[in-house]
Amino acid sequence: MVTIGSVPERLGKNRYDLDQDHSHIEVHQDVARRTGTGALLVRVCPARVYAQEADGTISVSEAACLECGTCRAVAAPGVLTWHYPRGGFGIVYREG
Ligand code: SF4
């Protein structure tokens, strides 16, 4: 019998090559505050890239980004600047 493991176990096998000089995600804090949609990013991201600080600021830890595009789909216009990491950087899937 083949076991495929839990989602966290499988995600733990991925590797992320961080581009230290070019973040591929930028949250425009003023727009996030004005539209009230910053917290939505925190809720929808499966990799917990976003966190809401005590002062309401949305912080970004892109080193876990799965490049799934969910945040792009739900963010209000102007909240995010998101593009794929430069070639050679980003998520490296080890399973499927
Ligand atoms: Fe999270 Fe997916 Fe957006 Fe990456 S692309 S920050 S994994 S929701």
Image: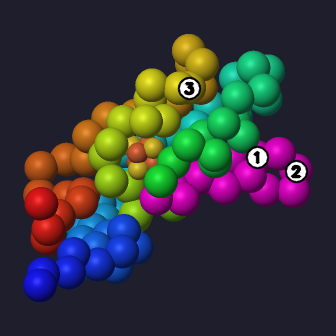
For the record, the magenta segment spans 47-60
Labels 1 & 2 near each other (Cβ < 8 A): yes
The image shows a total of numbered marks equal to 3
Which quadrant of the rendered structure holds the C terminus? bottom left
Secondary structure at badge 2 equals loop
Instruction: Tell me the residue at 12%/49% (across/down).
Output: 87
Nearer to us in this view, 35 or 13: 13
Up the image or down, 52 lies above or below 93; here it is above
Tell which circle, 2 or 3, labels the residue nearer the N-terminal end.
2
Q: Residues within 10 Å of mark 3 (few under 14, many from 20)?
A: many
Which amino acid type corresponds to the residue marked 2 in the rendered image?
Asp
Q: Amino acid at mark 3?
A: Ala
Q: CA distance from mark 1 to mark 2?
A: 6 Å
Which numbered dot is residue 55? Answer: 2
Judge from the rendering whether residue 5 lies leftward or rightward of residue 46; answer left or right.
Answer: left
- Disc 2 crowd rating (10 Å Cα; few below 14, some 14-19, many 20+) is few
Residue at image location 64% in from the left, 46% down from the top: 43
User: Circle 1 is placed at which residue position?
Assistant: 57
Q: Quadrant of residue 29?
A: top right
Residue placed farthest to the front in the image? Answer: 1
Residue linked to disc 3: 75
